[in-house]
DNA sequence: GTCTATACGCCGATAGAC
DNA sequence: GTCTATCGGCGTATAGAC
């Protein structure tokens, strides 16, 4: 028998993953309940058993964002290369769980979803604080914007996923730039 | 009498402006034909007289983008402070005509509108070329990403418009950062 | 827990009056 | 040139069978 903690049926996670994937690959408009259900391999009715409505699905996605982000902030604070270098390197699209929720959430923020916008603003503040501790308060924003720009470009390319080949090569130039800004 | 060049009725421009405003302030999903028509002060049928369908409206918006962008590239190339400093300063949201079409177009690119994505990629290349001529090939991308990050943040804030007050003060730090990267 | 069937509103677009 | 009326389709959500 499963313990009392063993909830979260597989179907539920599959639905959430499908929602995330569609947001990333095809944008918010394509992430309809129908499309999500199809990709997750359930019916629309089945989907709506797990999530009473679309807002509920978004809310759980944002929980996932919070959780993965908290882990990443710990890693960033403890990074041997320093928070700034860690941040830049992790701003390249690498299809990690955090990359995925982050981009998915960005798609929601872009269509003016208020709660998502609030969360994303909070994320930026957290990153900024750690960057300021590493490279100083005045250079923190330049570094933050460099990382954000990386994401922005990856997303415009034509949705991430297709790893813009040139990008990986740019990271070292960015890390080098960060070193010059340090102090 | 107006000369042969005097086309473009006011209503047509009003519709385009309304479309742009809605994209900026409320995102792509809110920029429906109904909403655009209402904001422009015409009926849906009236709107569809000027633009046979929504794609046509997007196409004309992209023409506006191209036109304003070409002007800005000229100014950037000729800027006394250098292309990089000009670029960073102009990446701050200032509600200029170019800022507005650019953000509006970004909203369309975000929902995976193919043609818009192509145009935006072209824009990035043009900027990159001018930046490379100013700060050198390796530091061009760090500068480009800084500017893009500025836009990204302004858009996440909660749609641009509400000028994130702190931002204006950050510009000098960014310009200073660019100076450090020069070489 | 998962499905089918269905209600209902909104979106894009057409037809045709004025 | 601008309007009203209307259609087909899709997207969210509900009801209820299995």
Image (cartoon, coloured by chain):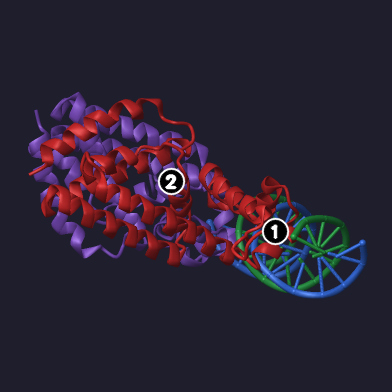
Chain colours: A purple, B red, C blue, D green
* Depicted A124 relative to depicted B147: above or below: above
Q: Which mark is residue B27?
A: none
List the single residue furthest toward the front: B1
* Residue ID at (44%, 60%): A22
Q: Is residue A1 left or right of residue B43?
A: left
Q: CA distance from mark 2 to mark 1?
A: 60 Å
Q: Residues within 10 Å of mark 1 (few under 14, many from 20)?
A: few
**Mark 2 residue element:** helix
On the question of residue B158 being in view, the answer is yes
Dot 1 falls on which chain? B
- Residue identifier under label 2: A61
Q: Residues within 10 Å of mark 2 (few under 14, many from 20)?
A: many
Q: Nearer the viewer, residue B40 or B80?
A: B80
Asked if marks 2 and 1 fall on the same chain, the answer is no
Q: Nearer the viewer, residue A76 or B80?
A: B80
Place of residue A107 in the rendered image (x, y in percent of width and height, measured from the top left): 44, 50
Q: Nearer the viewer, residue A83 or B88?
A: B88
Q: Is residue A119 left or right of residue B16?
A: left
Dividing the picture into quarters, in which one does residue B152 lie? top left
- Residue identifier under label 1: B1
Q: Give the quarter of the figure containing the N terminus of chain B.
A: bottom right
Place of residue B92 in the rendered image (x, y in percent of width and height, measured from the top left): 35, 37
**Mark 1 residue element:** loop
* Residue ID at (47%, 63%): B113
């Amino acid at each position: 028998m499963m313990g009392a903690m063993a909830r979260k049926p597989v179907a539920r996670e599959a639905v959430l993953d499908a929602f995330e994937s569609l947001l990333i690959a095809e944008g918010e408009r394509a992430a309809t309940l129908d499309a999500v259900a199809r990709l997750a391999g359930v019916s629309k009715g089945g989907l709506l058993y797990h999530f009473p409505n679309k807002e509920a699905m978004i809310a759980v996605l944002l929980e996932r964002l919070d959780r993965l982000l908290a882990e990443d902030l710990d890693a960033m604070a403890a990074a041997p290369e320093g928070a700034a270098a860690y941040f830049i390197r992790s701003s390249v699209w690498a299809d990690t769980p955090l990359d995925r929720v982050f981009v998915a959430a960005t798609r929601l923020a872009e269509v003016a979803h208020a709660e998502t916008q609030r969360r994303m603003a909070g994320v930026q503040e957290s990153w900024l604080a750690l960057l300021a501790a590493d490279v100083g308060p005045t250079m923190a924003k330049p570094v933050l914007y460099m990382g954000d720009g990386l994401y922005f470009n990856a997303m415009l390319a034509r949705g991430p996923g297709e790893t813009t080949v040139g990008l990986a090569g740019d990271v070292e130039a960015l890390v080098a730039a960060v070193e010059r800004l340090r102090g």
